[in-house]
Image (tube, helix red, strand yellow):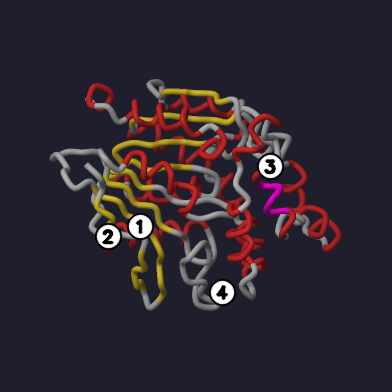
Amino acid sequence: MPPSLHGASNLQQNGESRWHRHLLPRSRQPGKSIGSAPARFPTSSIMFKNLMTALSDRLHLVAPDFPGFGFSAFPPKDEFEYTFRNIGACMNRFTEEINLKQFTIYLHDYGCPVGLQICIHHPEKITGIIVQNGNAYEEGVAGIWDEMRAYWANPTPEKKKELYGFLSEEGVKWQYTAGVPEALLPTLSPELWVLDWDSMKRPGNIDMQYELNCDYANHIASFPVFQAYFRKHQPRTIVIWGKYDPFFNVEEAACYRRDLPNAEIHLIEGSHWVLETNFDEVLRLISNFFTPAATQ
């Protein structure tokens, strides 16, 4: 039975427009799992469009665009604090507005620091976690983020120019293609980075993206807090990791089992964007995660 579309629309929140995708099966059994999928840099909920369509026969799915991302409003910085903690609080209010009481949360890239804020402040809402290349352990950023962390501690104009070249049209495209095996490059559609750059061209947006990236230092500092949450609450967890990701080390994937010993760990022959390049495999893994036998 085809899904009923209850979203792809705007929600007014504190006078600002919040855009989200929302799919609900026409025939929904009591107790069906709910999926909530925050987005990542530099994209929006569009990265979940195909996954939501494929799973909408059995799950209630919601994917919001963060403030300043995708089709959501971009409030000025003097009206909205662009930190992961504050965006997390904003997304929690969003779940309340749409009466999303409990859900499995999808943690990927920037969606990880935002989503983990919801996890630690509202653990009663979280029934499960899907991690796709999302940081909560030092092993994921060790070495590869050293220059960026040195810059955060001692910022200089020269280093900013060198390190933040990804905040450009070419840099946005590179975010998608970096680390992708050559055989998988044809799976990437150009509209992905074209739409992202169109959003980032809004006046002041690149400055916001720069400041939010600098706030990643606070996310890294909070790793022990997130790990304590895992140990205490033991949410059902599946970790899916593109092993050629040039941004987050593949060694982090296994780290989740330190605090979540029952977590599923799956390494994929892809990079950072396995929902685009390895869709069928990711869909199979997530579908299996939500089978009745797996959720009991």
What's the magenta region? 171-175
| Front position among marks 3 and 1 | 3
Label 3, residues with CA under 10 Å away: few <14, some 14-19, many ≥20: some
Q: CA distance from mark 4 to mark 1?
A: 20 Å
| Picture quadrant of residue 88 | bottom left
The reply to whether the C-beta atoms of the residues labelled 3 and 2 are less than 8 Å apart is: no
Q: Is residue 49 above or below residue 69?
A: above
Name which residue type carries label 1. Asn
Q: Which residue is mark 2?
A: 96
Q: Which residue is mark 1?
A: 92
Residue 270, position as x, y percentages in the image: 60, 30
Q: CA distance from mark 3 to mark 2?
A: 36 Å
Residue 285, position as x, y percentages in the image: 41, 27
Q: Which residue is mark 3?
A: 177
Label 1, residues with CA under 10 Å away: few <14, some 14-19, many ≥20: many
Q: Residue at position x 46%, y 42% from top?
A: 107
Question: Which is nearer the N-term, disc 3 or disc 2?
Answer: 2
Predominant secondary structure, magenta span: helix
Element type where label 2 sits in the image: helix
Q: CA distance from mark 1 to mark 2?
A: 7 Å
Q: CA distance from mark 3 to mark 1?
A: 32 Å
Q: Which residue is mark 4?
A: 77
Q: Residue at position x 74%, y 41% from top?
A: 146
Name which residue type carries label 3. Thr
